[in-house]
Structures are given as C-alpha cells and as structure tokens.
Image (cartoon, rainbow, N blue to C red):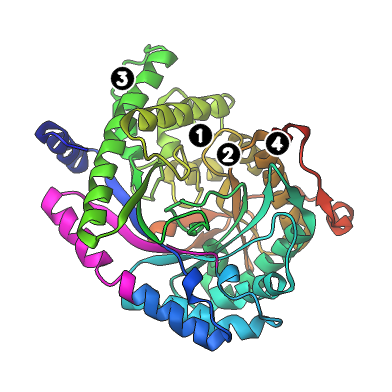
Amino acid sequence: MEYTQAEILQTVRMTEMEHLDVRTVTLGLSLRDCVRSTVGETAEAVREKIETTAARLVPVVDEIGEELGLRIANKRISITPASLVFDRAREASELMPLARAIDEAAGRVRVDFIGGYSALVHKGATRGESAFMDSIPEALATTERLCSSVNLATTRAGINMDAVRRAGELIKEMAGLTRDRGGLACAKFVCFANAVEDNPFMAGAFHGVGEAEAVINVGVSGPGVVNHAVRHAPADTPLDEMAELIKKLSFKLARAGELVGREAARRMGLRFGIIDLSLAPTPTPGDSVGEILEALGFERAGAPGTTAALALLTDAVKKGGAMASSAVGGMSGAFIPVSEDAAMIEAAQAGALTLEKLEAMTSVCSVGLDMVAVPGDTSAETIAAVIADEMAIGVMNNKTTAVRIIPAPGMKVGDVVEFGGLLGSAPVMPVNQFSPGVFIRRGGRIPAPIHSLRN
C-alpha cells in the first residue's frame, strides 16, 4: 500500500494541532510452542520467547515516531491466553512463576503493558482454568505490567454464570490486595462477552489461537481530531452531514495508523495484523469522547439522546475505517472509560452520567462499562450482577461487551480514586442497592439466544 506525501503531511498536521496519536503498537505473540511439562520450564520458555521476539519493538516504534513526527503513546505485547499455555495447575500458587516471568520479560523489553493473562471460560472451565482464575488476583497485585481478562460469554454459547459469579469474587479480592493503591489491580482486569482475538488495547488484549505466530497490531486514537472538527462545524449542520464528517476523519486516522503498523512490521520482519480505529480518550483536555458527544448538542454527556449520538459516532468511525483499510479489526468504534475521559468524569460528578445510562450506551459503543469506580463495600454478588447485565447486552446483540469495574476500597459515592497516568481518576458512582444475590447464587448457564442458531 502506497502513501502519498500529502497524506503524510496531513497526518503531521493532525498530530501537531488536534491531539492525534497512535495510542498503541502492540506485538501479538503466540506462546503455544512454549508449553512444557512443568510450570517452571514453561515460564522460562515464555520469558525467552517474549524477550527474543520483542527485543526490537520499542526502539523500532520510537524510531518510526521520530521519523514521522507522530506521537506513538504506548508499546505493548499481547500473548496467547496464559491458561492455555499451562493448563496443569491445580492450585493458584503454582502459576505465580508464570505470571512473574511474563511481567519480568515485559519489563526487560520496556513495553508499557502485556496482556493475555487470560482464560476463555464462556461455556465452562477445566480444572486448570479454575486454578488459573483463582491465581489472577495475586498475579495482578504482585506484578507491574501484567493485564488479565476472562471471556465469560459468547452469542453462540450463552453466559457462564458460574464464571460470572467467580469474577465478582475475584474483583473483590483484587481490590483488597491493592487497597493501598485504590484497587489498582481491578483496573488491569476485564470481563468479556464475545472477546475478539486481535484487540491491541489494554487491559483486555490477548493473542487469539486463530492468529499467526507474531503480528503487529495498531490502535489509533483520534478523539481530539474528531472533537476539533465537530466543534468547528456550524451548529445547524444536520446529523447525516456530521456522520459524513466523522467518517472522512476516521478514514484519515486509519490511514495514519496503518502507515505506522506496516512500517513497524516491515522493520521487525513480522506480519502486519490489524488497525483498530477506536476513539480511546485520555485525561488530556480535548482528547475526549464525552466532549465529542457534548459538541453534537448536549449540555452534558449522559443527557437524554446521548446513546443515539454515540451510535452515530461509532457507526461513522467503523465506516471510515472500512473505507481506508482492508485490515480493520479489534473493536474499532468508541470507548467510554469514565476515569480516562475528562468530560465523562465531569458528567458523572454532576449526576448527568449514571451507571444505568452507561449501560445503555454500551449497547452501541465498542466495548462496555470501562474504568467505572463503585463504593468499596459493593458486594461481590452485585458486581457479578453488573457483569451479567453487560454480558447479556453482548450476547443478545452479537457484539463485544466488557466490564472493568473497581470497588474502590474504603471509598463512598462522591469520592475520587486516583490512578494516575493514562488510567486517570475515577469518581465513585452509586450502585443500585437492591440485592441480586439469589439470582447470582443460582449459577449454571444462561443459554444462547435463538438467533445464535445460524448454521
């Protein structure tokens, strides 16, 4: 694919004036050939493969960014779900050498995060996977860069409610183990329905079993670019014309990201995977999906009509990306993480954005309830029920949904939990106080919907 000088200059202009960055260049890496008879041997093989394959990732990406004058915010790795790499453990403690080896290898190659300490349990769990899930709280609490996810539901399989219940308990454990850091481990853990295999964004990235040996995936984030354009459009511009404007910008963003990804893959001698064109906000003023929604005509994000506006935004982003590249993948839409979006934080603090409104918005956005802080005394069963609601939205709508929720230890509604950096700060939001306990304790599986029968 050839890129014109005009395209490159336009990318530089967006970088300098409109907060465009390439949010992440993520190396997807298969570890299936690292399986050994003991966890110690497996951990050593994993460490060696990560360090060998990813040794040049950070310098190569930094070099490309300097040459193009483009901000490339993060360099990351996603791996084969670790529960598949070693499935023989019977106790959670057995898996700590593997978790530490993955994290230490990530530190040695200087990436920001490594994702894939993950399990796929949407229909059931093996004994090894059950032990693996039990290991997640300690693994995330005692490592720096490691991220984890569990896939709890798919449209074809339904919802594994036993695993949903356990996920609620694990999140409470994580919060307790990282009490002194605001429950930070919870910010590195995602529950999925219909998880995708090529997602480059953390904390939910993993390298799916259908992927090649090693690929370069890119996540482009352009909410600042879209926000700038929407705010400068005439106030009486019809919504179909606004959608067209966003679509054209998304086309340009996708081209910029693919340029970086293909060049990184070429220099590292790897395959280029996908470009994920998800509008992923940061705490930086202007770099906000919430501000885009407000610029479309709302006093605050979360006001009536916000879900419709988010649907317009997500659809336009997907159409623009599909026009620009034949390698669009991942989520490619709009993320709405509360703690990482200044306008979302303000809307939550003002009472305009509630947990229930966020849940409605997740039916049309890229992912789900993301970086939502709730009171520290929220029960594991209530957290599991929140997760179950999101899983149902994903299953019934045949889309990816996710939950990254933080029961902030010792905090109550109105408090703010500080994570710093890209994770930002999260206002503690109220949760419905009526108990879902009996429903959650039933366990079992919610069957797949009738529209899953498509063969």
Screen quadrant of the N terminus:
top left
Q: What residue is shown at x 71% (from left), y 81% (from top)? A: 90
Q: What residue is shown at x 70% (from left), y 83% (from top)? A: 91
Q: Nearer the viewer, residue 32 or 405?
A: 32
Element type where label 2 sits in the image: loop
Work out whether mark 1 precedes mark 4 in sequence or the reverse, and give the earlier one. 1
Work out whether mark 1 precedes mark 2 in sequence or the reverse, and give the earlier one. 1
Query: Is residue 231 shown above or below 270?
Result: above
Q: Which residue is mark 2?
A: 353
Residue 15, position as x, y percentages in the image: 20, 42
Work out whether mark 4 precedes mark 2 in sequence or the reverse, and give the earlier one. 2
Q: Amino acid at mark 1?
A: Ala
Bounds of the magenta segment: 52-81
Element type where label 4 sits in the image: helix
- Specify the label residue 233 is tagged with: 3
User: Residue 302 is drawn in which quadrant?
Assistant: top right
Q: Which residue is mark 4?
A: 396
Q: What residue is shown at x 42% (from left), y 26% (from top)? A: 316
Query: Is residue 261 shown above or below 139?
Result: above
- Specify the label residue 301 is tagged with: 1
Q: Amino acid at mark 4?
A: Met
What is the CA distance from the residue labelled 4 to the residue labelled 2?
24 Å
Work out whether mark 3 precedes mark 1 in sequence or the reverse, and give the earlier one. 3
- Compared across the picture, whether 15 is left or right of 372 comes to left
- Compared across the picture, whether 277 is left or right of 194 comes to left
- Give yes or no for contact between labels 4 and 2 (Cβ–Cβ under 8 Å): no
What is the CA distance from the residue labelled 3 to the residue labelled 1?
19 Å
Work out whether mark 3 precedes mark 4 in sequence or the reverse, and give the earlier one. 3
